[in-house]
Amino acid sequence: MSRFILKRLALLLAMLVGLLAITFTVSHVAPGDPASLAAGPDASPQMVQQIRQEFGLDRSLPEQLWIYVRGVLHGNLGRSVRTSHQVLDDLEVFFPATFELVTVAMLIAILFGLPLGVLAAVRQNGWIDHLARVVSVSGVAVPMFWLGIMLQLIIALNLGWLPLGGRLGLMTDPPATITGLYLIDSLLHGDGSAFRDALAHIILPAMALSLPALASIMRVNRAEMIEALGQDYIVNARAQGIAPLRTVAVYALKNAMLPTLAIIGLRYGWMLGGTVLVESVFDWPGIGLYATQSAIAQDFQPIMGVTLLIGINFMLANLIVDLAYGLLDPRSRVTA
């Protein structure tokens, strides 16, 4: 197992080097002067020249790459022209909101997608299976921003059950920062009022964000469960009189979970980079909204920082999935 982990860590390091190279290349092939983009549209020629010298943009490409990598390793992602803060400081403020939203959305997708996929496979061609197919198609066909607007219109405006948007109500003070996750921080401080308010505000955007992941998890799990239930070891388990629930939950689901686990990791990474529309609809102060506002303001450094952060989190999510895959299926540790 240790050899398997070392291989995965080496692969992660190689991908990180590739990610740094890609972000560096994109910053130099993008239309316009990188110094002008970093300085902003209202910068004077003297300011552009100062930024060019500060970031080493007047040096050769190998020197610029080394300066960029060294800056990233030291946590220097540049300064945002729009907020006048270091990009790393901005990300420390905005990223926890996105991480909390994506995590809750993924939990919703798993809690509903897995059981629905299992039931659809066990009751194939029944009404649950037909419902699962409708959800599967809807997850692909329904845009997240449209679903978010419909949830706001029906649940927030017409029924008044949940707040319209934002992360907390105007009358609720944010809990003192420990993790940056309001749900966790409010529980750690024993602030039940803040926890309930944060939970109420996160439900609608998490529901809108979770639908594509829920559909993918349910579709993959259903297909794998149907295949697993037709295997000889399942027929043998049934012939030996093993309880149907144990046969499905222990024997079939364990094998069906391997591809499902892979899609969960991929979807989690995609959700981190795909929150822009949902955060814009619900006015959620995350990195998606931060990147959108930076792009509108032609603020280049925050966009680079967000791209790098999303890429790193995507790689970490896949590393965790690979390790879990190795624990569930020892054969993968031999072939990897």
Image (spheres, rainbow, N blue to C red):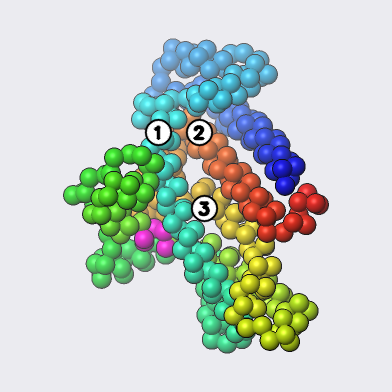
Residue 271 disc label: 3
Badge 1 is on which residue? Answer: 90
Q: Is residue 18 above or below residue 79?
A: below
**Mark 2 residue crowding within 10 angstroms, few (<14) / some (14–19) / many (20+):** many
Kindly identify the residue that appears in the image at 45 percent across and 47 percent down.
99
Kind of element beneath mark 3: helix
Q: Where residue 37 appears, x then y in whole percent?
A: 49, 27
User: What type is the residue that disc 1 sits on?
Assistant: Asp
Q: Where residue 80 appears, x then y in whole percent?
A: 41, 28
User: What type is the residue that disc 2 sits on?
Assistant: Gly
Give the residues in magenta: 203-207
Kindly identify the residue that appears in the image at 30 percent across and 59 percent down.
200
User: What type is the residue that disc 3 sits on?
Assistant: Met
First in sequence: mark 1 vs mark 2: 1
Prevailing secondary structure of the magenta residues: helix
Q: How far apart are marks 2 and 3 (CA)?
A: 17 Å
Q: In this view, does 273 lie above or below 203?
A: above
Q: Where residue 277 appears, x then y in whole percent?
A: 44, 52
Kindly identify the residue that appears in the image at 33 percent across and 39 percent down.
177
- Specify whether residue 29 is in view: no
**Mark 1 residue crowding within 10 angstroms, few (<14) / some (14–19) / many (20+):** some
Kindly identify the residue that appears in the image at 60 percent across and 84 percent down.
123
| Quarter location, residue 295 | top left
Kind of element beneath mark 2: helix
Q: How many labels does the image show?
A: 3
- Decide: marks 1, 2 in contact (CB < 8 A)? yes
Q: How far apart are marks 3 and 1 (CA)?
A: 20 Å
